[in-house]
Image: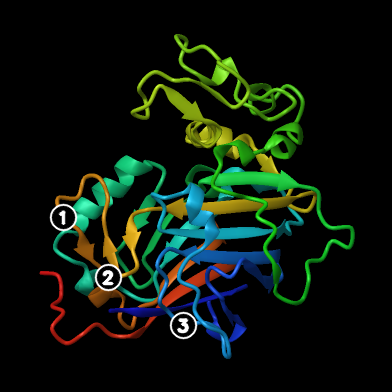
Amino acid sequence: MYSIVVTAGPSLDESTHQCVHVNSETYVPISGPDFEGQVAVRVKDFSGLAPDGLEPIPQSKYFDDAQDVTFSIEASGIYKSPEELKADDLMFGIVFRQSIAERLPSTYPLVVKAFQWFNPNIEFQLEGENPTMLAPLVTIMSRITCTSPPPSGKFSDQSTPATSRVVPSELEEDISMIINGQEHGSRVAGAFPQDGHLVKSMLPVTSDLEGPQESSWGGWFGSSKVSRPQARQKWFSDKEVRQETVLRGNDYVITTDLQNGFMDFKDMSLRMSGLPWPIRLGPYMKGRPVQYCCVSRDRKKLYWSVIFTIVEGPDEDDAEEK
């Protein structure tokens, strides 16, 4: 059995991090030069460490409506940017602390192909001293919504109860503030009506809108429906659209939620379509924390990070993946 600790902070320096009380429905405040906000983490069947004096919480009600999801990283805040911040410049994913080439499992090419099938916008750089696995934030996040900033422009300096601005329901997504903030006549501004919903110009010519929340999209995603998040991810898969989209991060709070069901935290294994069997990642994570980061494309800015660290190794009879 693996045990993990989850921390969050404004950099990759763990001295700036706080331990996250996973599944507690509280936010950890993040305050840095480029981001002011808060982060919450939820992990199904969590058995790791909690902050001092608190008990681990194994489950979250979040998973009641997201039964196929095993973890969620929710971040909410203001992306400070004195210059124009384009959607193509805001990246999210994993930044490795050191070279991983010598410890990659033999099955890693399959893992790369599986992730690229899942989301072709993921950019892999697994060689060198600081490997990364990053994608434009607007294409990788499961949910995105925008709200007005707090009157003070500041978030609490203490951990605060999560208000669930993003919940598993796809109907909660709303990027109208982003769309309405684009220059009049731009391709991005013309893609959505005032409420930020999908319009027919974004769909194949054979598609018909069926309502404000969802629309017909043939079998592109293995379903006769495409959700609002899927539409947003598809639309922003176009690099030119991302480069044309300005994120006015000082003007609104951007709340994002990354969720997936690939990782089983009970045995630290990866399970996803395209893989013939689960891949046990525990042996490769020991001594190499998994660092989820929101960064600028040029890596000169790090907005916020969440780090998963194994603090206890597996039982001795657990063998490494061959």
Q: Residues within 10 Å of mark 2 (few under 14, many from 20)?
A: some
Q: Is residue 35 visible?
A: no
Instruction: Give the class, few, some or many, for how many residues have Cα within 10 Å of label 1's Cα (few <14, many ≥20).
Output: few
Q: x%, y% of residue 117?
A: 30, 41
How far is the residue under mark 2 from the one under mark 3? 16 Å
The picture quadrant where one finds residue 291 is: bottom left
Judge whether residue 209 can be spotted in this image: yes
**Disc 2 + disc 3, Cβ < 8 Å:** no
Q: Which residue is mark 2?
A: 267
Residue where numbered disc 3 is placed: 49
The local secondary structure at tag 2 comes to: loop
Q: Position of residue 136 (x, y in %)?
A: 51, 48
Q: Earlier in the sequence, mark 2 or mark 1?
A: 2
Residue position for label 1? 277
In the rendered view, would you say 109 is above or below 180?
A: below
Q: In 3D space, how far apart are the residues under numbered discs 1 and 3 (Cα atoms)? A: 29 Å
Q: In this image, 269 relative to 36: left or right?
A: left
Measuring 60% from the left and 19% from the top, which residue is drawn there? 211
Q: Are discs 2 and 1 less than 8 Å apart at CB?
A: no
Task: Decide which of 15, 186 is in the foreground and name it.
Answer: 15
| Colour theme | rainbow
Looking at the figure, which quarter contains the N terminus?
Answer: bottom left
Callout 3 amino acid: Leu
Name the amino acid type tagged 2. Asp
Q: CA distance from mark 2 to mark 1?
A: 14 Å
Q: Contact (CB < 8 A) between labels 1 and 3? A: no
